Every structure is written in C-alpha cells, then in structure tokens.
Image (cartoon, rainbow, N blue to C red):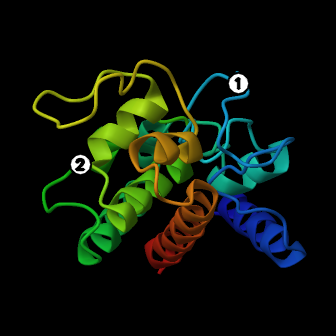
Amino acid sequence: MKRLLAILTGAIVALAIGSSPLFAQRPHGGGTGGGNSGATGAAMHGAGTDHGSGAENSAATGKGAAAGSPNTVLTNNTRLDTHLTSLLQSKGLLAAGTDLKTACAGFKNLGQCIAAVHASHNLKIPFACLSADMTGTAPTTGSTCPDGTGTSKMSLGKSIQTLSPNASAKTEEKSATKQADADINEAESDSKS
C-alpha cells in the first residue's frame, strides 16, 4: 500500500509540474512524431519513437508500466484492466467482449496502444491496420489493410500519415495521445476507488 501511495504521489507531482504525458510517449528530437528514429519497440512504438524518461516510466506504472508491455501492466493490475476496458467500451472505442491485453499485444506500452485505439476511432482507420504498422507485424487475417501494412514498425504519426494521407498526422497523433492519457488517468482513479 505504501508503494502504491508513493507511485501515485510521483505521478501527481509529475502531472503538476507539467511534464509530458505519463502514459503515451512523445517524440523527441526533430519533433514531428512522423518518422521512425530507429528506436526499437512499440509503447505503443508509435506515439513517438523514443522512450520516455525513467521518471515518466516509473510514475506511469508503478514498476515502469510504460517500460513494460501492456500485457504485463494489465495482468499485474487487473482492476486497471477492468476499468480501462469498461471505459473504452462505454465510449464505443472497444467492442464488447474484446480483451484489452490481446488488442494491445505487440505494443511497447499501454499509452501507445490506447492512443492507437483513439486514432483509429477518430479517423475511422481500422485498428488492425494501425496496430500492424505500429508493431511491425502482419495485419490480422480478414483485415482490409493496404498492401505493405505492417512491414516495418512505425510511430503513430507515421502510421496515420500512411493510412490516412489527408489527415494532419501530427495533430491527430497529439489528440489521440491526450485522449489516451485522460482515459488511463480516469481508469486508474476508478480502479483505486
């Protein structure tokens, strides 16, 4: 319980200071978030290609949820899994009966996956296509993804740019990341009540 309190305090302090969002990664360096800097992984490899700072990672998960896979984070925190799944389903972002751990398989962190869920909904891009691009895996069987989808890992912004060329990838990535942060924060708060 003390450890949980310490983690929560750290997360609140980081938010109060105005640091970048704790759960979804942000691009570093050149700054558009559209390119792949060559970093491996996928936190969601996509909401940015570089990893967040250690302070962001440890505050986000207790054990470094941003550093751990969504499966690990959600398995270790079943209340978060339940609350986040319910929240996403209530907003029409996740189909009833969908297992969030399965949907987020292959993403580097939970924030990246939830940002992809939002981008998919906002732009009406099949989540399977965004997921394939961001994790560098073949799209699920039966998906209607364009040829070449999933051939290499991409950031969320680059995947948006590829799958929805008329969208403002940078703006849409930023919006999806903010929505993901808000959902994760809300689900965390609900899971503690």
Kind of residue at badge 1 = Ala
Q: Are marks 1 and 2 in contact (CB under 8 Å)?
A: no
Q: Quadrant of the N terminus?
A: bottom right
The answer to whether 118 is drawn above or below residue 192 in the figure is above
Q: Residue at 26% x, 28% y: name it.
A: 139
Which residue is pictured at 84% across the width and 65% down the height?
19
Circle number at residue 39: 1
Relative image position of residue 54 (x, y in whole percent): 82, 42
Q: Who is closer to the viewer here, 193 or 122?
A: 122
Q: Using the image, determine if residue 157 lies above or below residue 85.
A: above
The three-letter amino acid code for the residue at tag 2 is Asp
Residue 99: mark: 2
Task: Give the percent coordinates (x, y) of residue 17.
Answer: 89, 73
| For residue 119, above or below residue 151 | below
Please identify the quarter of the rendering in which residue 93 is found. Answer: bottom left
Q: Marks 1/2: CA distance?
A: 28 Å
Tell me the SS state at disc 2. loop
Rendered residue at 55%/74% (across/down): 182
At a point 52% along the width and 64% down the height, the residue shown is 176
Earlier residue among tags 1 and 2: 1
Q: Disc number at residue 103?
A: none
Label 1 crowd bin: few (<14), some (14–19), many (20+), radius 10 Å: few
Element assignment for label 1 = loop
Q: Is residue 152 visible?
A: yes
Q: In the rendering, at what x and y percent does residue 44 appear?
A: 53, 42
